Image (cartoon, helix red, strand yellow):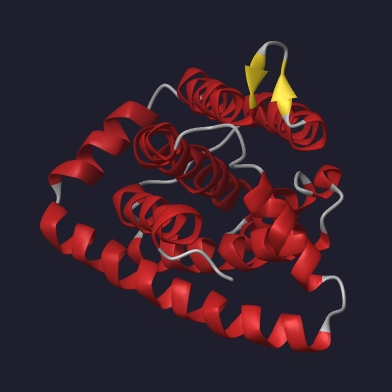
């Protein structure tokens, strides 16, 4: 996918820096619980990306048409690799970080009151792919065009981790930083939203529903 940018990229960034921290701090948005609100926020950010970059839909369509099966396979493999990294990281964190256990427990507490089916559908069809449409497919791509690949990657990782600070959970911030770096590098190597989207949604489903960490 080609890269571009412009001053309009600041508007989606401002939205991300506003909506994500608010949601992660209050864990709801008006009458919506965390999961409905997360789906709405991610949808709003993805929509802002398409509104800010008129070329984005065409670039995305080109991505989806080019060797999709290979990209899906790479997404599956990368999701498994990231899960393995977190499996090891979880064990090490619980041994050396006194706050790790409570932090992980707090993340899973977000599932309270929501059905597994609703969480799974939102993760698979809205939250996972929607986040990649915004963070990598839009923000990282456009800022690579403005700043260059080497500078854009740490910038996007920093913003991605920063919006999780409002949660007050160091483990969630650390997890966001690791995921942001992993998917950011994967996007640079694959140049495909489809790859990182599949990776993200499968990792989400594994961590939250199918193979949660104890």
For this rendering, which residue is in front, 214 or 92? 214
x then y, percent, for residue 94: 74, 81
**Quadrant housing the C terminus:** bottom right
The residue shown at (37%, 59%) is 199
Tell me: 169 left or right of 15: right
Q: Locate residue 128: give its quadrant.
A: top left
Tell me: 143 left or right of 201: right
x then y, percent, for residue 83: 46, 72
List the single residue furthest toward the top.
Answer: 31
Q: Locate residue 196: give its quadrant.
A: bottom left
Whether residue 154 is visible here, answered yes or no, is: no
How many numbered discs, if any?
0
Tell me: 166 left or right of 53: right
Q: Locate residue 79: give its quadrant.
A: bottom left
For this rendering, which residue is in front, 164 or 139? 164
The residue shown at (37%, 36%) is 117
x then y, percent, for residue 163: 76, 44
x then y, percent, for residue 132: 46, 45
Give the answer, above or below, for where 169 lies relative to 3: below
Whether residue 60 is visible here, answered yes or no, is: yes
Give the answer, above or below, for where 211 lies relative to 55: below
């Amino acid at each position: 996918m080609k890269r571009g940018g412009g001053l309009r990229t600041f508007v989606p960034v401002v939205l991300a820096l506003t909506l994500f921290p608010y949601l992660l701090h209050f864990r709801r948005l008006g009458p919506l619980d965390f999961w409905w609100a997360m789906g709405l926020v991610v949808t709003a950010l993805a929509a802002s990306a398409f509104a800010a970059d008129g070329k984005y839909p065409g670039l995305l369509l080109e991505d989806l048409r080019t060797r999709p099966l290979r990209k899906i396979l790479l997404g599956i493999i990368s999701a498994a690799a990231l899960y393995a990294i977190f499996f090891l990281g979880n064990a090490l964190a619980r041994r050396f970080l006194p706050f790790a256990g409570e932090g992980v427990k707090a993340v899973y507490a977000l599932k309270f009151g929501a059905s597994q089916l609703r969480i799974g559908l939102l993760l698979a069809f809205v939250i996972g792919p929607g986040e990649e449409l915004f963070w990598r497919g839009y923000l990282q791509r456009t800022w690579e065009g403005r700043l260059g690949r080497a500078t854009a990657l740490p910038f996007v990782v920093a913003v991605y981790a920063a919006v999780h600070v409002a949660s007050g959970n160091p483990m969630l911030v650390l997890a966001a930083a690791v995921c942001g770096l992993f998917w950011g590098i994967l996007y640079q190597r694959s140049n495909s939203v489809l790859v990182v989207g599949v990776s993200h949604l499968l990792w989400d489903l594994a961590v939250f529903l199918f193979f949660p960490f104890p």
